[in-house]
Image (cartoon, rainbow, N blue to C red):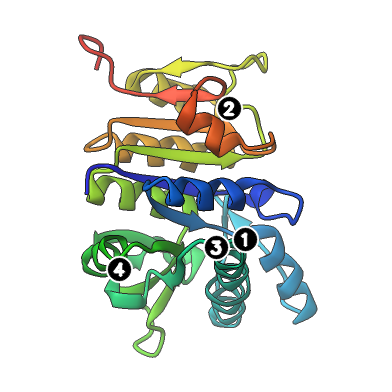
């Protein structure tokens, strides 16, 4: 399983104009093993608004009460997930949509009672992923987990987990060849906004500590650091560029690499 590529799709890669799905299908047809993890924050906010549910963030994460969790689950595991899977299959690929709940893939606990039903990953159960990959499918994973530990409410069996974190945990558990984040920025930048092409783990941690990396970049960097326990290379690249994923696999270059460097970390 160590030749698997884990791809995290950000909001910029979910539009109808994007070439990422084409790249995913092409790579599968070239016998690449892929796991796709997706978010859907903007669409969640739109649907919460339609339901008259206000959106509030604390510490950069969406506060999730029971009503919000129902909408988030429906949007992520339903609408967004199935749209991606439908696009893959329509182009001749073989995709299967699942969430972290299916096969007890992602098992979590409540991260912070202040955030409500927002989870932290405790365990990744790879049985279902391995079965799908070995059968020639692309698992497309929505970041909803089982509420396995420290339950606030026995009736609430699911948790909303940051998709970046889920991607990092899956990459770490599966021993992925690489973890790739497709984002709506050029990569990780310094205080002056200049792209940083390469970071060691300690340098990446220092960027977070200094505040140079902030908001949505923080969970991506943390996910990369988590994945490096067993993943060879992690990449944060600009998913807005045409065929960014294919270019990354075939040529590399651009974006930011976070990687353990001999004698440094």
Q: Is residue 241 left or right of residue 115?
A: right
Question: x, y percentage for residue 104?
Answer: 28, 74
Disc 4 residue crowd, few under 14, some 14–19, many 20+, Cα 10 Å: many
Q: Answer yes or no: do the residues labelled 3 and 2 have beta carbons within 8 Å? A: no
Front: mark 3 or 2: 3
Question: x, y percentage for residue 236?
Answer: 51, 32
Question: What is the spatial separation of the Cα atoms under label 2 and label 1, in whole angstroms?
Answer: 20 Å
Disc 1 residue crowd, few under 14, some 14–19, many 20+, Cα 10 Å: many
Q: Return the residue nearer the eye: 130 or 165.
A: 130
Identify the residue shown where x is 46% and y is 32%. 249
Instruction: Identify the mark at residue 105; answer none if there is no mark.
Output: 4
Q: Which residue is mark 3?
A: 92
Q: Which residue is mark 2?
A: 187
Q: Earlier in the sequence, mark 3 or mark 4?
A: 3
Q: Considering the numbered disc 4 on the image, is that residue within a helix, a strand or a loop? A: loop
Q: Answer yes or no: do the residues labelled 2 and 4 have beta carbons within 8 Å? A: no
**Quadrant position of the C terminus in the picture:** top left
């Amino acid at each position: 399983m160590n030749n698997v590529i884990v791809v995290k799709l950000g909001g910029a890669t979910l539009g109808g104009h994007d070439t990422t799905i084409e790249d995913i299908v092409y790579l599968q047809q070239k016998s690449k093993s892929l796991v796709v993890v997706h978010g859907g924050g903007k669409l969640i906010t739109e649907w919460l608004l339609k339901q008259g549910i206000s959106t509030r963030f604390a510490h950069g994460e969406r506060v999730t009460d029971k009503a919000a969790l129902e909408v988030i689950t429906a949007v992520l595991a339903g609408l967004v997930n199935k749209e991606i899977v439908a696009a893959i299959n329509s182009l001749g690929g073989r995709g299967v949509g699942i969430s972290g709940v299916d096969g007890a893939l992602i098992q979590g606990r409540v991260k912070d009672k202040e955030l409500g039903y927002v989870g932290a990953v405790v365990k990744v159960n790879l049985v279902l992923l391995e079965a799908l990959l070995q059968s020639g499918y692309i698992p497309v994973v929505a970041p909803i987990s089982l509420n396995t530990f420290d339950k606030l409410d026995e009736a609430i069996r699911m948790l909303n987990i940051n998709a970046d974190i889920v991607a990092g945990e899956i990459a770490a558990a599966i021993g992925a060849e690489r973890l790739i984040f497709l984002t709506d920025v050029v990569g990780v930048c310094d205080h002056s906004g200049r792209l940083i092409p390469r970071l060691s783990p300690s340098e990446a941690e220092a960027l977070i500590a200094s505040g140079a990396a902030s908001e949505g970049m923080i969970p991506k960097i943390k996910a990369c650091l988590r994945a490096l326990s067993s993943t060879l290379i992690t990449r944060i690249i600009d998913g807005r560029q045409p065929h960014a994923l294919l270019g990354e696999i075939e040529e590399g270059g651009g974006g930011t690499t976070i990687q353990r460097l001999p004698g440094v970390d």
